[in-house]
Amino acid sequence: MCWSGEASAAVAVLGLSSAYFLKRKGEPKEIYLPTAYFVLMEGLQALTYIVVDECGNPTNTLLTRLAILHISFQPFFINMLGMEFVDEKVKKRIQKPIYLMCGVVAALCLGRLLPFYEQLGRCELGTAMCSHTQTCAYRGQWHIGWEILLNGLNAQWRWYVVAAFIVPVLYGSWKWSAYHYVVGPLLASVTTTDVNERPAVCCLFSTCIIALLVNTRIRRYVYVKRWPTWGPILRWGRGGPEKAKSGV
């Protein structure tokens, strides 16, 4: 299997059309904005295919850095969507701290681009997107791979992993987190052995969330009706117990 710029462009058009459909349907922005944001990466990759493998080309370097910019802010939209599948009271209580955490994580991810190698060290070769020699988008085994000059801050993108996959489980959106993990990192690891290619493949497969969001019947299965942390979350700052709304 070999991907192409045309295929990425088609996915981007399909995804943006789906986001527009969701907006026209009257869905909340927490549903259609993540859809639009995730497929923007495919639009970016479609452009990258024009200069792929042209290491040293300023456009290639710029598009590769824009990919990191997009990845750095993904936890905002992952959690924006994740909070739609939990109790409304819980969502209102945790929104601000969750978005604040995502801002810190975005700063840590973008901070990896700073060329302060003496102070922060260098990334560990063999980990995702790490290079000690160049910043470049290249053809991987079947999709785009990214090599990027990174320092040692936020090694192995651990805080991205925490924000994107662990935090949603903590506030109860475990079904969404499991679905996102399966259609993202797990499928990426199965389809390519190139760790620098897996982030792009993961972003591509993550567009499978469109099927989840457009089909409201499927979406219902992702809602969580009760979770052990909801009691403490709802009592936090209130000074008294408040039961989370639950269903049958």
Image (spheres, helix red, strand yellow):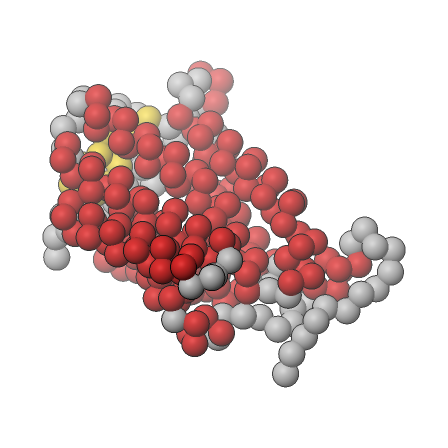
Can I make out residue 115 in this image? yes
Above or below, 158 against 28 in this view is above
Above or below, 218 against 10 in this view is below
Q: Position of residue 217 (x, y in %)?
A: 43, 76
Name the residue rendered at 21%, 25% in the picture: 59
Q: Residue furthest right?
A: 239
- Relative horizontal placement of residue 55, taking residue 187 as reference (left or right): left
Looking at the rendering, in which quadrant would you find the N terminus? bottom left
Q: Position of residue 218 (x, y in %)?
A: 42, 74
Between 126 and 146, the one lying in front of the other is 146
Name the residue rendered at 68%, 67% in the picture: 228
Looking at the rendering, in which quadrant would you find the C terminus? bottom right
- Relative horizontal placement of residue 93, taking residue 104 as reference (left or right): right
Q: Position of residue 186 (x, y in %)?
A: 35, 59
Can I make out residue 166 in this image? no
Above or below, 26 against 3 in this view is below
Name the residue rendered at 28%, 32% in the picture: 64
Q: How many marks?
A: 0
Name the residue rendered at 17%, 26% in the picture: 55
- Relative horizontal placement of residue 240, taking residue 76 as reference (left or right): right
Between 67 and 213, the one lying in front of the other is 213
Q: Position of residue 72 (x, y in %)?
A: 43, 38
Between 22 and 147, the one lying in front of the other is 22
Q: Quadrant of residue 190?
A: bottom left
